[in-house]
Image (spheres, rainbow, N blue to C red):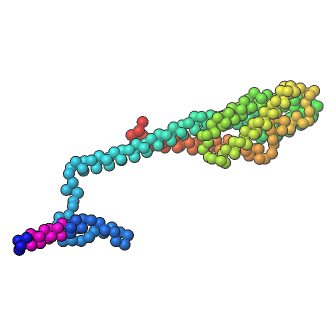
Amino acid sequence: MALSAALLWRHLRQLQTSRLAAAASTPTLRSGHWRWKTTTAETTENEPRFHWRDLPWQAISIAVGIGTLLYKTQKSEEMELRRNNLKYVNNQLSQLYGPLYGNRLANQQSYREALHGHDNLVKFLQDAEKKWRDPETTDEGVRMLTRWRKFLLYVMHPLDLKAEEIIRDNAHLLENGVEEAELFVKFVFHVNYEKLIVAKWQEKGEVIGNRDIVEEGDFSRERNGGKSDDETFQMLAHVVRNVKETYEKLVQRKRSLVREIEERGGH
């Protein structure tokens, strides 16, 4: 009987010890936070602490490999971004601002030559009209008007049509947003007005001047190149200035991107 009681007591002690050990490793939720029950099996200050040197070399190698891969991936993505930016800038220069810049420079230079020293078209036409009114220089006035109309029809108008085509086909490459888009819309409207003028000349056969059919109104700017208001003058000058400045800015950006790619080992 005494032996049976001793065995039973030992069994109960073992069961109690196993429950305490299990409870020591079970998290309990208190006040919204996970906390661990403390038991006699709790870690003491004398126990050795974990150190990274205790990790197996395979784990360290894997960690270093992952870090290296992430670093290379980041650098590769940065390089790819620079290449994409360079490609976009090249498209802007080759398809929009480069051709448009050359177009406007050619237009501007030929326009100045066509005016033969006059400051602008209005003054040129005023001088032509003055000569036309004078019986002694009527033919000279007609020749001036004819010369201008030939220039507009065969030189300036084709350049303006080409500029309109460049803008229309490459509007997705605009650099300066809504303000620039609105500027080009005004320019296209001006070119469309120019189309009407040329169409009327061709319809009436007025391109080649004839002193017998020239009228007083033929010397107005509205019949020879579009509106003569100050807003139109400023718009045309703004187009040239905007294209020039944007072209130069993009050239600098391209050089910077090429340099960055070369410095980072890109091709």
Write down the quadrant of residue 209 in the picture: top right
Residue 82's x, y, as percent?
A: 47, 42
Write down the quadrant of residue 117 in the picture: top right
Of the 4 image quadrants, the one containing the C terminus is top left
Camera-side residue of 64 and 198: 64
Count every numbered label the image shows and give the total: 0
Camera-side residue of 32 and 44: 32
Q: Residue at x 6, y 73 (%)?
A: 1
Q: Residue at x 21, y 54 (%)?
A: 55
Q: Residue at x 38, y 70 (%)?
A: 32
Range of residues picked out in magenta: 5-18
Q: Residue at x 80, y 38 (%)?
A: 226
Horizontal side, residue 42 vs residue 167: left or right: left
Horizontal side, residue 139 vs residue 188: left or right: right
Camera-side residue of 124 and 184: 184
Looking at the image, residue 67 lies above or below residue 1: above
Q: Is residue 15 magenta?
A: yes
Residue 154's x, y, as percent?
A: 75, 27
Looking at the image, residue 127 lies above or below residue 63: above
Write down the quadrant of residue 129 in the picture: top right
Looking at the image, residue 107 lies above or below residue 208: below
Residue 2's x, y, as percent?
A: 5, 74
Question: Is residue 207 in view?
Answer: no
Q: Main secondary structure of the magenta part?
A: helix
